[in-house]
Image (cartoon, rainbow, N blue to C red):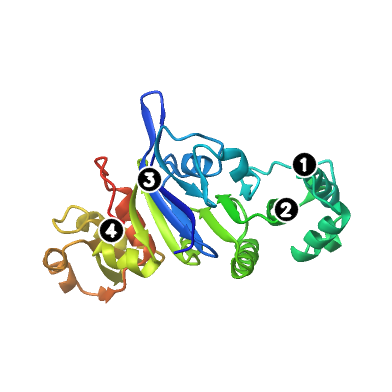
Amino acid sequence: MNGVIDVRGLTKRFGRHVAVNGVSIDVAKGEIAGFLGPNGSGKTTTIRMLCGLLTPDEGEGTCLGLDVRRDSKRIKAQIGYMTQRFSFYEDLTIRENLDFVARLYRLRSRKAQVDRTLERLGLGDRQQQLAGTLSGGWKQRLALAACVMHGPKLLLLDEPTAGVDPEARRVFWDQIHVLADEGLTVLVSTHYMDEAERCHRIFYINEGVVIARGTVDQVIADAGLTTWTVRGPGLARLAAALSDCDGVEQVAPFGNTLHVVGGDAERLEAAIAPFRKRHGLRWELDATSLEDVFIQLMGRRTGGQQAAA
């Protein structure tokens, strides 16, 4: 692998609280890596260590070939970091905001750089619009434009599409894939399953520990779950009854169906056998979804041990 990110054993403590515990991540050039996990799991802390905003208490490795401990200033100059919160001047236009960012980076041919970025991100027709009047999707596009204008080699995105409508999220991800095809490496944290499925690989972190990694197909396969889908009347009562059965580890409603999930196929089938005789219910052995896996992972206590790479 041509590793843009290659870190091992990153650990960060805040007082007695261990926010990140021995995290190891490797991301190749041009790869889109998804970083997933519940709130407070350590995603943002890890991203801030990678971009030089926080110094690890333990661990080592490189980001863009630079030491994450010693070379934080040089790392910062070569990355784009997009936070959850819109952080640009709302009383300035799109062009004025980008011009300000270009000044911060001391870019040469500043006007040409701004013009090129406006065109590249499809912002040209709105360049004179005040940032404060933009919708969430357009604010997101402005933030992305500001992150890539200086030509970074690595893009770190911390839940960039939170609160953005589905159409704007799809446009955003189309742009991310174009940038990755051009050689830009991306690490993005997200809570959305459809976004996770658009990543080349994913890392799942819980309680500061990476407990699953790989392609979406690999993560689903490694979970070893069996999923049954149930359709029919009285699903709420059925869910309550199934949740107490040995061998049933998840019962989750999905629209007009239930997903019934277990880690031991034989125990799960024995548990649901009496219910499959009920009139009007249709049971089908189904493919396990990424959401089924993540619900399972969210309930798992890590015990301080990281899954093997």
Q: Which mark is residue 150?
A: 2
Query: Callout 4, which amino acid?
Result: Val
- Return the disc, 2 or 3, that comes first in the chain's sequence: 3
Residue at 36% across, 70% down: 217
Q: Which mark is residue 104?
A: 1
Mark closer to the observer (1, 4): 1
x and y percent of residue 242 in the render? 21, 58
Q: CA distance from mark 2 to mark 4?
A: 48 Å
Q: CA distance from mark 4 to mark 3?
A: 31 Å
- Return the disc, 1 or 2, that comes first in the chain's sequence: 1
Q: Which mark is residue 23?
A: 3
Q: Residues within 10 Å of mark 3 (few under 14, many from 20)?
A: many
Judge whether 64 appears above or below 53 on screen: below
Left or right: 157 in relation to 150: left
Instruction: Place residue 106 in its image quadrant.
Output: top right
x and y percent of residue 62 in the render? 48, 48
